[in-house]
Amino acid sequence: MVFELHVWGPAFSLPSIDPHCLAAIAYLQQAVPRGEWQLVASSNPTLSPTNELPALRDGERWIGGFRNIIHYIAQVSQGQWVLDAGLSEQEAADCIAFSSFVESQGQPLLDLSLYVSSENYAGVTRPLYNTIQPFPLPYLTPPSIRAAAKLRTEHLGLSGLDIDSEEGSPKDNSIIPASLRTPRTTVSSLLATTPEINARIRLDALAQSFLGPLQDLLGEKRYLVSERQFSSLDCLALGYLSLMLLPELPQPWLAKSVRAHSPQLCAWIQDLSSRIFGPSVTPAAALLTSSSSSTSPDPSALPWKIPDTGGLLGITTTYLTTLADSLPVLGQHRLDSKMRRQNANTKTPTRDLSPASSWPTVTLLGGLLAGVASLAVLFLKRGLFEEEETRGGQGLDAFGEAGAALSFLADQMDEQVRRDRAQAVGGEVDVVVGVEGGL
Amino acid sequence: MAKEEEDLGFWGDARQTRVVKDLFSIPPPVKKLFDRVPVVTYPPNPLPQRGPKTSRVPSLYVFSNDVDAAAGRPSFNPSCLKWQTFLNIAGIDHRLISSNNHASPTGSLPFLLPAAQSSNVSQEFLPPIPSNKLVKYASEHGGRVKEPSNVRYEAYQSLLDHRIRNAWLYTLYLEPLNFSAVAYELYVSPTSSSALVRASISHTLRAAAEAELLKQSAVIDADDLYSEADKAFEALSTLLGDDLWFFGGDKPALFDASVFAYTQLLLDDGLGWKEKKLCMALRRRENLVLHRERLLVRYFGGS
């Protein structure tokens, strides 16, 4: 049986927009012989039992998540398709520790760079989802990913990067009284600089604390933990680092940091990503929409397969499922029961493909209701208002160029003020006269 | 024309201020009355009796109960225990005060209230020290602090802060058996005797743990959490090897305290764990168990 690896679609000339998907692609590319697996850019997390991509499909069986996939492949191949097999004890320990490090420290950086930063999100990341997902889904996916990213980076106190948010005053966790705190981003500081420049020092320190240990670990070696062996840590690090270095963003602070702090790591990323992911990937090539490349002659290219969206019905179901999952109580219950079903089938996680319990019908009804209600709201809110906000944000940035217009405005305002003052003076005279008349 | 207007304005201004002054001056009878009633400033009220008294020893506020705190026994909260152990290792004399998050200026325990330097304690303002400033405080107050600089320090620290912490959150709050047997007794029962309040606190605690775990993944996958924690203990065990302390130091340091914070609580039978997956994963690593015992004997009198 040929494995199918389902991932988020390609972006930034990489085969996927998600670091874990990139890691899984790299792992399968290195561990599993060609012809034994196929890559599907389905961009649909509801396929996975853990509700996250990457997900591996082996016949009727679904396995969700990078680590579960590694375990499953090792299990199925009887220990044949394992990258970490030949590592020494110390190297294996490093592999575990640095995997945790890369995930926990790399995720907030990617979150800030791709999702929280308003300019990057509105200018690049959000439009990208239109190219990798069928029509109504991009209305749900990027905002929910962004919300999760904001939640994850809340403790860093860098929410100022997001100039879209209305509330503007996050919960105060500081012990410094309000009167002594330096003011948050004001309109004038926004005019002067972008929030990324304001937060530059903090962002740099954050990036440095992530890159430093990796740079030290790499040293002069060919791979991160060992000289000759490509490990699962390399996959993970490649996933995160290539998404930091390669995207071309309006606010490229993260790529700049990587280039400035560790040129060695840069070379390593560029070398590996071109070797493993092959030449740059376009959405058309991944989704095989262009008819020419149905049989890829290039042996270095990834084994793409056309994603089966299930037509209009499939897309609608996905849309409703996504909506149902995002409902406060119902959604969590759905996810939990999905998990429980998976756990009930013990170590080989299987997804129940013929749900017979009453819950799915209830959730489907709930989903339908929510869908009808939210469709209107979402289309209005996300589609129209946010577009407006974006335009507003770009307008602010364009102020520098529109200096002439501004100065004209300013002149006019001065004139207005002068006129007002003159009137005010006249008014005072009247008052005095009135008082005297009264006396 | 403009000049005339200005002149007019000037004169108008002067006249107006005179009028206004007359308007606002206090009428003589009222002024007399006020002169007869002098303004008295009372001395400030004394602080409440049960308020914290500044002492000659710094006070560390931790999750604990009064008896254990007085005896200096380990706190039952990992981050409190980490800093408690660190202060013991650094040789900073301190006393423990049983408290909860509401007492802390940062919203979370532990924090340290420094010792009063002079005798006129009431006039002195001593800002509390949150846990992330404790290393600095210790080194400024003659603590023996020496952190090993190692390439691997950050990576292995992240194992504790994420992999093991996540499994800890799950096993303590979201395993129903453990929650009712361990967490309920430690965090819920002491706060109130009312069933309603207890139910509300239990719910808040569990929801907070769940939210924390859901930040990192779409669903809470218990098997994954446990297997990752198991691998994390494996890695820590390999890192420690046959050394006495982590990173080959001749004395324990902050990293040892961070590890001890979890190993002590998972290996403490007094807590009454019911679902012991995480405890068993740790017990399989003999050198980590011995490491915990060394620290317990050396800094907590083996209690």
Image (tube, coloured by chain):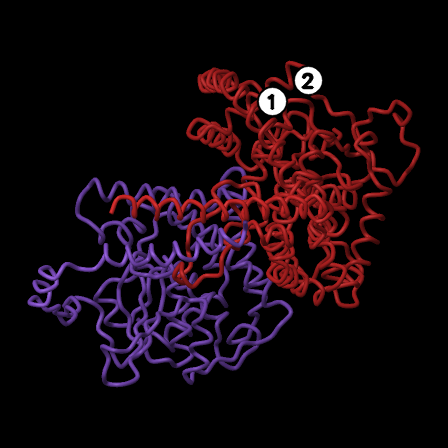
Chain colours: A red, B purple
Instruction: Classify mark 2: residues with Cα within 10 Å, few (<14), some (14-19) or many (20+).
Output: few
Name which residue lies at 70% across and 53% down: A237
The quadrant in which the N terminus of chain A is found is top right
For the point 21% across and 59% down, the residue is: B25
User: In terms of depth relative to the viewer, which is nearer, A240 or A433?
Assistant: A433
- Amino acid on which the number 1 mark rests in the picture: Thr
Q: Are marks 2 and 1 in contact (CB under 8 Å)?
A: yes
Q: Decide which of B27, A294 is in the foreground and name it.
A: B27
**Chain letter of disc 1?**
A
Q: Secondary structure at mark 2?
A: loop
- Pick the residue in front: A306 or A154: A154
* Other residues around mark 1 within 10 Å, as few (<14) / some (14–19) / many (≥20): many
Q: Which mark is residue A47?
A: none
Q: Looking at the rendering, which quadrant does residue B265 occupy?
A: bottom left
* Camera sees residue B252: yes
Answer yes or no: is residue A84 visible: no
Q: Which chain is mark 2 on?
A: A
User: The disc labelled 2 sits on which kind of residue?
Assistant: Gly
- Location of residue A119 with respect to B41 vertically, above or below: above
Check the image and report above or below for B297 versus A378. below
Residue B109 picture quarter: bottom left
Q: Residue under label 2, please give it.
A: A310
Whether marks 2 and 1 lie on the same chain? yes
**Mark seen at residue A318:** 1
Query: Residue at 40% across / 58% down in the picture?
Result: A178
| Residue A70 pos. (x, y %) | 66, 44
Q: Position of residue B120 (x, y in %)?
A: 23, 83
